[in-house]
Image (cartoon, rainbow, N blue to C red):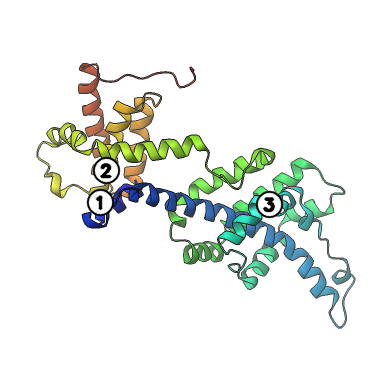
Amino acid sequence: MQTLYALETMEPGNIKPGTATSLLREKLDQTCQIFTYLLYSLVQVARYAETDARARASKHLPTADDLNVNTKISGNEFLEQIHQDKGFQANLEMWKMRFLPDQELIRKLYNSLAAADIYRTYIQTPGRNRAAEKEIVEYMYKNVLVGNELFLQHMEDHFLHWGDDAEMMGLLINNYLNKPHLFNFMQLISQEKLEYARELLLTVSDKKDYCLELIKPKLQNWDPERIAAVDMLLMEMGVCEFLYFPTIPTKVTINEYIDLAKTYSTPQSGQFVNGILDNILKDLEQAQQIQKTDRTKK
Protein backbone atom coordinates (compact mmCIF):
# COMPACT_ATOMS: atom_id res chain seq x y z
CA MET A 1 0.00 0.00 0.00
CA GLN A 2 2.72 2.45 0.95
CA THR A 3 4.72 1.62 -2.17
CA LEU A 4 1.69 2.06 -4.44
CA TYR A 5 0.89 5.37 -2.76
CA ALA A 6 4.48 6.54 -3.27
CA LEU A 7 4.23 5.62 -6.95
CA GLU A 8 0.94 7.54 -7.26
CA THR A 9 2.59 10.70 -5.98
CA MET A 10 5.69 10.47 -8.20
CA GLU A 11 6.10 12.34 -11.46
CA PRO A 12 5.56 9.87 -14.33
CA GLY A 13 8.96 10.75 -15.78
CA ASN A 14 10.63 9.57 -12.56
CA ILE A 15 9.07 6.10 -12.71
CA LYS A 16 11.39 3.75 -14.53
CA PRO A 17 11.42 -0.04 -14.95
CA GLY A 18 12.20 -1.50 -11.56
CA THR A 19 11.16 1.61 -9.60
CA ALA A 20 8.21 -0.16 -7.97
CA THR A 21 10.18 -3.17 -6.77
CA SER A 22 13.05 -0.94 -5.61
CA LEU A 23 10.65 1.11 -3.48
CA LEU A 24 9.14 -2.08 -2.08
CA ARG A 25 12.55 -3.47 -1.19
CA GLU A 26 13.44 -0.18 0.51
CA LYS A 27 10.31 -0.27 2.66
CA LEU A 28 10.86 -3.92 3.60
CA ASP A 29 14.46 -3.06 4.53
CA GLN A 30 13.16 -0.31 6.82
CA THR A 31 11.00 -2.88 8.59
CA CYS A 32 13.99 -5.19 9.02
CA GLN A 33 16.05 -2.31 10.39
CA ILE A 34 13.45 -1.56 13.05
CA PHE A 35 13.28 -5.21 14.11
CA THR A 36 17.06 -5.51 14.30
CA TYR A 37 17.32 -2.33 16.35
CA LEU A 38 14.66 -3.46 18.82
CA LEU A 39 16.60 -6.65 19.49
CA TYR A 40 19.82 -4.65 19.76
CA SER A 41 18.13 -2.40 22.33
CA LEU A 42 17.14 -5.44 24.40
CA VAL A 43 20.75 -6.65 24.31
CA GLN A 44 22.06 -3.21 25.27
CA VAL A 45 19.70 -2.87 28.24
CA ALA A 46 20.65 -6.35 29.48
CA ARG A 47 24.36 -5.69 29.12
CA TYR A 48 24.05 -2.42 31.01
CA ALA A 49 23.85 -4.59 34.14
CA GLU A 50 27.62 -5.06 33.82
CA THR A 51 28.18 -1.34 33.30
CA ASP A 52 26.09 -0.62 36.37
CA ALA A 53 27.98 -3.21 38.42
CA ARG A 54 31.36 -1.70 37.49
CA ALA A 55 30.18 1.82 38.23
CA ARG A 56 28.81 0.91 41.63
CA ALA A 57 31.87 -1.15 42.59
CA SER A 58 34.15 1.78 41.72
CA LYS A 59 32.48 4.17 44.15
CA HIS A 60 34.71 5.75 46.76
CA LEU A 61 32.80 3.96 49.53
CA PRO A 62 30.83 1.16 47.91
CA THR A 63 28.23 -0.64 49.97
CA ALA A 64 27.81 -4.40 50.11
CA ASP A 65 25.00 -4.09 47.56
CA ASP A 66 27.28 -2.03 45.31
CA LEU A 67 29.85 -4.79 45.36
CA ASN A 68 27.33 -7.55 44.65
CA VAL A 69 25.21 -6.34 41.73
CA ASN A 70 23.60 -9.34 40.05
CA THR A 71 24.43 -9.34 36.31
CA LYS A 72 22.54 -12.51 35.40
CA ILE A 73 20.46 -10.69 32.78
CA SER A 74 23.55 -9.84 30.74
CA GLY A 75 23.97 -13.55 29.98
CA ASN A 76 20.32 -14.25 29.17
CA GLU A 77 20.42 -17.16 26.72
CA PHE A 78 17.99 -15.60 24.22
CA LEU A 79 19.79 -12.25 24.18
CA GLU A 80 23.17 -13.95 24.06
CA GLN A 81 22.07 -15.99 21.06
CA ILE A 82 21.02 -12.77 19.32
CA HIS A 83 24.31 -11.08 20.11
CA GLN A 84 26.35 -14.02 18.84
CA ASP A 85 24.42 -14.39 15.59
CA LYS A 86 26.62 -13.45 12.62
CA GLY A 87 23.63 -12.30 10.58
CA PHE A 88 22.53 -10.00 13.39
CA GLN A 89 26.02 -8.54 13.67
CA ALA A 90 26.14 -8.07 9.89
CA ASN A 91 22.86 -6.13 10.00
CA LEU A 92 24.17 -3.88 12.76
CA GLU A 93 27.21 -3.05 10.64
CA MET A 94 25.32 -2.64 7.37
CA TRP A 95 22.78 -0.25 8.87
CA LYS A 96 25.23 1.56 11.19
CA MET A 97 23.14 0.85 14.26
CA ARG A 98 25.85 0.64 16.88
CA PHE A 99 25.88 4.42 17.07
CA LEU A 100 22.14 4.87 17.60
CA PRO A 101 21.57 3.92 21.24
CA ASP A 102 21.44 6.83 23.68
CA GLN A 103 23.46 5.62 26.69
CA GLU A 104 21.50 7.80 29.09
CA LEU A 105 18.29 6.28 27.74
CA ILE A 106 19.75 2.77 28.09
CA ARG A 107 20.62 3.57 31.72
CA LYS A 108 17.05 4.73 32.41
CA LEU A 109 15.60 1.66 30.75
CA TYR A 110 17.87 -0.62 32.77
CA ASN A 111 16.92 1.14 36.01
CA SER A 112 13.25 0.65 35.11
CA LEU A 113 13.91 -3.05 34.59
CA ALA A 114 15.93 -3.37 37.81
CA ALA A 115 13.06 -1.87 39.83
CA ALA A 116 10.51 -4.45 38.63
CA ASP A 117 9.42 -7.31 40.87
CA ILE A 118 9.66 -9.79 37.99
CA TYR A 119 13.29 -8.83 37.49
CA ARG A 120 14.18 -9.26 41.15
CA THR A 121 12.59 -12.72 41.10
CA TYR A 122 14.53 -13.54 37.94
CA ILE A 123 17.95 -12.63 39.30
CA GLN A 124 17.31 -14.27 42.67
CA THR A 125 16.41 -17.61 41.08
CA PRO A 126 19.51 -19.82 40.79
CA GLY A 127 20.53 -21.19 37.42
CA ARG A 128 18.94 -20.60 34.05
CA ASN A 129 15.49 -21.86 33.26
CA ARG A 130 14.53 -21.48 29.59
CA ALA A 131 10.95 -20.45 30.37
CA ALA A 132 12.17 -17.79 32.82
CA GLU A 133 14.79 -16.59 30.32
CA LYS A 134 12.07 -16.10 27.71
CA GLU A 135 9.62 -14.53 30.17
CA ILE A 136 12.03 -11.80 31.25
CA VAL A 137 12.84 -10.88 27.63
CA GLU A 138 9.13 -10.67 26.83
CA TYR A 139 8.69 -8.41 29.86
CA MET A 140 11.60 -6.23 28.75
CA TYR A 141 10.12 -5.74 25.30
CA LYS A 142 6.53 -5.06 26.35
CA ASN A 143 7.19 -3.00 29.47
CA VAL A 144 10.72 -1.64 29.45
CA LEU A 145 10.93 -0.74 25.76
CA VAL A 146 7.57 -0.18 24.05
CA GLY A 147 5.92 0.60 27.38
CA ASN A 148 8.27 3.53 27.91
CA GLU A 149 7.44 6.95 26.42
CA LEU A 150 11.11 7.95 26.19
CA PHE A 151 11.93 4.87 24.15
CA LEU A 152 8.91 5.34 21.89
CA GLN A 153 10.02 8.90 21.20
CA HIS A 154 13.52 7.62 20.49
CA MET A 155 12.10 5.20 17.91
CA GLU A 156 10.01 7.91 16.26
CA ASP A 157 13.07 10.17 16.06
CA HIS A 158 15.21 7.56 14.31
CA PHE A 159 12.76 5.46 12.28
CA LEU A 160 10.28 7.19 10.01
CA HIS A 161 8.04 4.12 9.71
CA TRP A 162 8.04 3.11 13.38
CA GLY A 163 4.37 4.07 13.75
CA ASP A 164 3.37 1.83 10.87
CA ASP A 165 5.44 -1.16 11.95
CA ALA A 166 5.15 -1.01 15.75
CA GLU A 167 2.27 -3.48 16.07
CA MET A 168 3.89 -5.98 13.72
CA MET A 169 7.15 -5.82 15.69
CA GLY A 170 5.49 -7.44 18.68
CA LEU A 171 4.57 -10.41 16.47
CA LEU A 172 8.10 -10.67 15.08
CA ILE A 173 9.63 -10.55 18.56
CA ASN A 174 7.26 -13.28 19.70
CA ASN A 175 8.08 -15.40 16.65
CA TYR A 176 11.77 -15.07 17.38
CA LEU A 177 11.43 -16.04 21.03
CA ASN A 178 9.36 -19.10 20.11
CA LYS A 179 11.80 -20.40 17.48
CA PRO A 180 15.13 -18.56 17.73
CA HIS A 181 17.06 -21.46 16.18
CA LEU A 182 15.06 -21.14 12.95
CA PHE A 183 15.60 -17.40 12.57
CA ASN A 184 17.67 -16.03 9.72
CA PHE A 185 18.67 -12.42 10.32
CA MET A 186 19.87 -12.12 6.74
CA GLN A 187 16.32 -12.84 5.52
CA LEU A 188 13.88 -11.64 8.16
CA ILE A 189 11.01 -11.73 5.68
CA SER A 190 10.49 -15.15 4.09
CA GLN A 191 10.89 -15.67 0.37
CA GLU A 192 7.21 -16.60 0.17
CA LYS A 193 6.14 -13.27 1.67
CA LEU A 194 8.58 -11.34 -0.52
CA GLU A 195 7.17 -13.01 -3.63
CA TYR A 196 3.61 -12.30 -2.52
CA ALA A 197 4.39 -8.62 -1.90
CA ARG A 198 6.16 -8.25 -5.23
CA GLU A 199 3.42 -10.06 -7.14
CA LEU A 200 0.65 -8.00 -5.53
CA LEU A 201 2.51 -4.78 -6.23
CA LEU A 202 3.10 -5.58 -9.88
CA THR A 203 -0.41 -7.00 -10.38
CA VAL A 204 -2.10 -3.88 -9.02
CA SER A 205 0.11 -1.69 -11.22
CA ASP A 206 -0.60 -3.81 -14.30
CA LYS A 207 -4.35 -4.31 -13.74
CA LYS A 208 -5.12 -0.80 -12.47
CA ASP A 209 -7.30 0.21 -15.44
CA TYR A 210 -9.36 -2.99 -15.27
CA CYS A 211 -9.80 -2.63 -11.49
CA LEU A 212 -11.07 0.91 -11.96
CA GLU A 213 -13.58 -0.37 -14.53
CA LEU A 214 -15.02 -2.56 -11.79
CA ILE A 215 -14.79 0.02 -9.00
CA LYS A 216 -16.12 3.20 -10.62
CA PRO A 217 -19.64 1.92 -11.41
CA LYS A 218 -20.05 1.08 -7.72
CA LEU A 219 -19.26 4.60 -6.54
CA GLN A 220 -22.76 5.88 -7.46
CA ASN A 221 -22.86 9.52 -6.34
CA TRP A 222 -19.21 9.57 -5.33
CA ASP A 223 -16.79 11.54 -7.46
CA PRO A 224 -13.79 9.23 -7.99
CA GLU A 225 -11.49 12.26 -7.97
CA ARG A 226 -12.65 13.20 -4.47
CA ILE A 227 -12.32 9.78 -2.89
CA ALA A 228 -9.29 9.39 -0.63
CA ALA A 229 -6.35 8.11 -2.66
CA VAL A 230 -5.63 5.44 -0.05
CA ASP A 231 -9.21 4.14 -0.30
CA MET A 232 -8.90 3.76 -4.07
CA LEU A 233 -5.58 1.92 -3.72
CA LEU A 234 -6.98 -0.44 -1.11
CA MET A 235 -9.97 -1.24 -3.30
CA GLU A 236 -7.68 -1.90 -6.28
CA MET A 237 -5.57 -4.20 -4.12
CA GLY A 238 -8.68 -5.98 -2.86
CA VAL A 239 -10.04 -6.56 -6.38
CA CYS A 240 -6.66 -7.94 -7.48
CA GLU A 241 -6.63 -10.39 -4.57
CA PHE A 242 -10.17 -11.50 -5.51
CA LEU A 243 -9.18 -12.21 -9.10
CA TYR A 244 -5.50 -13.09 -9.21
CA PHE A 245 -4.57 -14.60 -5.83
CA PRO A 246 -6.43 -17.91 -5.64
CA THR A 247 -5.05 -19.00 -2.26
CA ILE A 248 -6.34 -15.93 -0.39
CA PRO A 249 -9.98 -16.36 0.79
CA THR A 250 -12.23 -13.46 -0.17
CA LYS A 251 -13.33 -12.97 3.46
CA VAL A 252 -9.70 -12.58 4.52
CA THR A 253 -9.14 -10.02 1.75
CA ILE A 254 -12.12 -7.89 2.75
CA ASN A 255 -11.30 -7.97 6.47
CA GLU A 256 -7.66 -7.03 5.84
CA TYR A 257 -8.53 -4.03 3.69
CA ILE A 258 -11.22 -2.84 6.09
CA ASP A 259 -8.58 -2.80 8.84
CA LEU A 260 -6.07 -0.98 6.62
CA ALA A 261 -8.68 1.62 5.63
CA LYS A 262 -9.57 2.27 9.27
CA THR A 263 -5.91 2.65 10.18
CA TYR A 264 -4.58 4.71 7.29
CA SER A 265 -7.52 6.63 5.85
CA THR A 266 -10.61 8.49 7.09
CA PRO A 267 -12.96 7.43 9.93
CA GLN A 268 -15.59 6.38 7.36
CA SER A 269 -13.16 4.54 5.09
CA GLY A 270 -13.53 1.10 6.67
CA GLN A 271 -17.26 1.01 6.03
CA PHE A 272 -16.85 2.57 2.58
CA VAL A 273 -14.19 0.10 1.41
CA ASN A 274 -16.18 -2.79 2.88
CA GLY A 275 -19.32 -1.78 0.96
CA ILE A 276 -17.59 -1.34 -2.40
CA LEU A 277 -15.50 -4.53 -2.20
CA ASP A 278 -18.49 -6.59 -1.05
CA ASN A 279 -20.57 -5.23 -3.94
CA ILE A 280 -17.85 -6.00 -6.50
CA LEU A 281 -17.32 -9.47 -5.04
CA LYS A 282 -21.00 -10.35 -5.49
CA ASP A 283 -20.83 -9.40 -9.16
CA LEU A 284 -17.62 -11.35 -9.71
CA GLU A 285 -19.05 -14.43 -7.99
CA GLN A 286 -22.23 -14.20 -10.06
CA ALA A 287 -20.11 -14.02 -13.21
CA GLN A 288 -18.11 -17.01 -11.90
CA GLN A 289 -14.85 -15.04 -12.07
CA ILE A 290 -13.71 -15.98 -8.57
CA GLN A 291 -11.58 -19.12 -8.52
CA LYS A 292 -10.16 -19.92 -5.10
CA THR A 293 -8.09 -22.94 -4.12
CA ASP A 294 -6.96 -24.46 -0.82
CA ARG A 295 -3.46 -23.08 -0.22
CA THR A 296 -2.47 -26.28 1.63
CA LYS A 297 -2.89 -28.35 -1.49
CA LYS A 298 0.15 -28.95 -3.68
Q: Residue at x 40, y 18 (%)?
A: 293
Q: Secondary structure at mark 1?
A: helix
Which residue is tagged 3?
86
Q: Residue at x 39, y 27 (%)?
A: 248
Tag 1: Cα neighbours inside 10 Å, few (<14), some, or many (≥20)? some
Task: Tell me if label 1 and label 2 are in contact, CB under 8 Å.
Answer: yes
Q: Residue furthest front?
A: 17
Tag on residue 8? Answer: 1
Counting residues from the start of the chain, the first of labels 1 and 2 encountered is: 1
Q: Nearer the viewer, residue 218 or 269?
A: 218
> With respect to residue 145, does 262 lie above or below?
above
- Measured Cα–Cα span from mark 3 to mark 2: 39 Å
Q: Residue furthest bottom?
A: 60
Tag on residue 233? Answer: 2
Q: Residue at x 74, y 62 (%)?
A: 47
Q: Position of residue 1 (x, y in %)?
A: 34, 45
Q: Is residue 260 left or right of residue 166?
A: left
Q: Position of residue 46 (x, y in %)?
A: 72, 59
Q: Nearer the viewer, residue 247 or 24?
A: 24
Q: Secondary structure at mark 2?
A: helix
Mark nearest the camera among 3 and 1 is 3
